[in-house]
Amino acid sequence: MSKLEDLEAVKSKILTEMKCPLKDAAKNLVFGKGNPDANIMFIGEAPGAQEDEQGIPFVGSAGKELDKLLRSINLTLDDVYIANILKYRPPENRDPTVDEIYRHTPYLIEQIKIIKPKIICTLGNYSTKFVLAQFNIPNMKKIDGITKLHGKVNNILIDEMNFMVIPLYHPAAMLYNPNLRPILGKDFLEMEKVLVQKRE
């Protein structure tokens, strides 16, 4: 089977198997978008209102900011794959609960195993803590927050998967705090240097 078919199988499992109150309240499953053969995977936190409406991650204002940041380092959706920790929108865009993270992340891990990215860019606290804790949810509380970790490259080996993790502020954060805009822009430029080195 192709990666696309494998991802569709995971999507079907969520629709048929997952039990979660968020699923009952949401309009749509928000699974992922982009190139399944990409070397770079972005992982955000959870769908917002626009994402819930369309069933596609990062289509709202934060998504437009992410598109601009990608373009700033000459990347497009053809070069990356994008998913979230949660597959359904939490009410009022509140933070994910520990129970929700437990229910949703097995499917995210399956996505990662199928895509096999060389680089994972985590967007915001929850995805950063989850990935740097090596998918061990109880250990998430031991991981520093994004303020300390942003822009720092980490090499991770999980289940025989070796990838580089680059924590980044979530693009939504700079909509609320414009002071983060130059920081996020700089972190993307640093990421571009890493990409150039990986190609050489």
Image: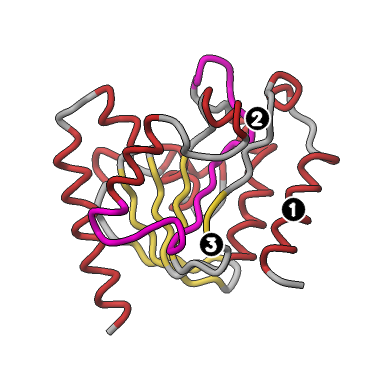
Among numbered discs 2 and 1, the one appearing first in the sequence: 1
List x then y, in percent, for residue 7.
Answer: 69, 58
Quadrant of image for the N terminus: bottom right
Magenta-colored stretch includes residue 74: yes
Label number found at residue 191? none
Looking at the rendering, the stretch of residues picked out in magenta corresponds to 70-94
Q: Amino acid at mark 1?
A: Val
Assign a secondary structure to mark 1: helix
Q: Which residue is mark 3?
A: 35
Quadrant of image for the C terminus: bottom left
Assign a secondary structure to mark 3: loop
Q: Which residue is mark 1?
A: 10
Q: Is residue 162 left or right of residue 152?
A: right
Q: Amino acid at mark 3?
A: Asn
Between tags 3 and 2, which lies in front? Answer: 3
Q: Are marks 2 and 1 in contact (CB under 8 Å)?
A: no
List x then y, in percent, for residue 106.
Answer: 68, 48
List x then y, in percent, for residue 90.
Answer: 58, 22
Distance (Cα) linking label 1 and label 3: 16 Å
Q: Is residue 183 left or right of residue 49?
A: left
Distance (Cα) linking label 3 and label 2: 30 Å
Q: Which residue is mark 2?
A: 99
Give me the residue at 58% from left, 63% from top.
Answer: 36
Q: Is residue 100 left or right of residue 134?
A: right
